C-alpha cells in the first residue's frame, strides 16, 4: 500500500503544495509546530532518508534549501530549523520549521491547530514570496 506521502504525491490526498519538481514535493504540514512548517519529500518512495542514494539525497537537500529560503521570506522567523525524524510516516522526509527559539522545533510539544483556510493562506504567502 502506498505511504501517506505517496498518496499526496499522486494527488489522491490533497495538500498545500509550496514547491515541486520532477523529484521532490514540498507541502505544509497539517499539524505544524509553527506557521510555515513544511515537509520536503522525494517522489521516489523510500522509507529511510539514508537509504536514498547520495546524489538524490544531495539534490533533496538543495531543494529543501530553496524551499527554506522561500518560507523564510514569507514567515517572520529568525531561522528555518531542519529536522529528520522519520518514525511516523515510512517515507523519507525533511521538516522545515520556522524558528524564533530552539524550543520551536521540539516535536513533543503540542502542535498548532490550524484550519484549511489558514494553511491555504500560508501556502499563498510562501508561493508569492
Image (spheres, rainbow, N blue to C red):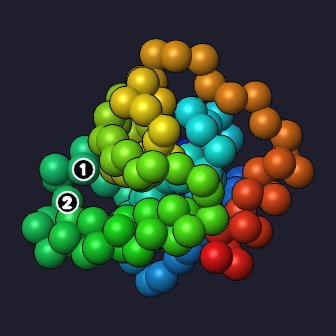
Cα gap from disc 1 to disc 2, whole angstroms: 6 Å
Residue 121: x and y, percent?
81, 59
Q: Which mark is drawn over residue 52?
A: 2
Residue position marked by numbered label 1 in the rendering: 49
Horizontal relation, residue 13 to residue 91: left or right: right
For the C terminus, which image quadrant? bottom right
Q: In terms of secondary structure, where does tag 2 sit?
A: loop
- State the residue in front, 1 or 90: 90
Horizontal relation, residue 121 to residue 25: left or right: right
Q: Quadrant of residue 113?
A: top right
In the image, residue 24 sits, relative to residue 80, either above or below, namely below
Residue shown at the point (21%, 65%) measured from the top left: 57
Is residue 25 at all visible to an observer of this figure?
no
Residue 25: x and y, percent?
50, 68
Residue shown at the point (16%, 50%) measured from the top left: 50
Residue 76: x and y, percent?
60, 53
| Crowd band around label 1 with a 10 angstrom C-alpha radius: few (<14), some (14–19), many (20+) | some
| Crowd band around label 2 with a 10 angstrom C-alpha radius: few (<14), some (14–19), many (20+) | some
Pointer 1 with pointer 2, Cβ within 8 A:
yes
Q: How many marks?
A: 2
In the image, residue 40 sits, relative to residue 81, either above or below, namely below
- State the residue in front, 23 or 60: 60
In the image, residue 129 sits, relative to residue 84, either above or below, namely below
Residue 15: x and y, percent?
70, 57
Amino acid at each position: 500500500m502506498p505511504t501517506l506521502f505517496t498518496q499526496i504525491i499522486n494527488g489522491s490526498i490533497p495538500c498545500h503544495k509550496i514547491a515541486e519538481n520532477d523529484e521532490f514535493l514540498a507541502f505544509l504540514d497539517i499539524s505544524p509546530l509553527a506557521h510555515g512548517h513544511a515537509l520536503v519529500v522525494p517522489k521516489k518512495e523510500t522509507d529511510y532518508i539514508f537509504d536514498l542514494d547520495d546524489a538524490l539525497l544531495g539534490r533533496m537537500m538543495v531543494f529543501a534549501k530553496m524551499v527554506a529560503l522561500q518560507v523564510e521570506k514569507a514567515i517572520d522567523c529568525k531561522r528555518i530549523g531542519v529536522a529528520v525524524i522519520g518514525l511516523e510516516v515510512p517515507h523519507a522526509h525533511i521538516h522545515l520549521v520556522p524558528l524564533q527559539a530552539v524550543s520551536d522545533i521540539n516535536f513533543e510539544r503540542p502542535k498548532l491547530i490550524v484550519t484549511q483556510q489558514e494553511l491555504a493562506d500560508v501556502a499563498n504567502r510562501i508561493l508569492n514570496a
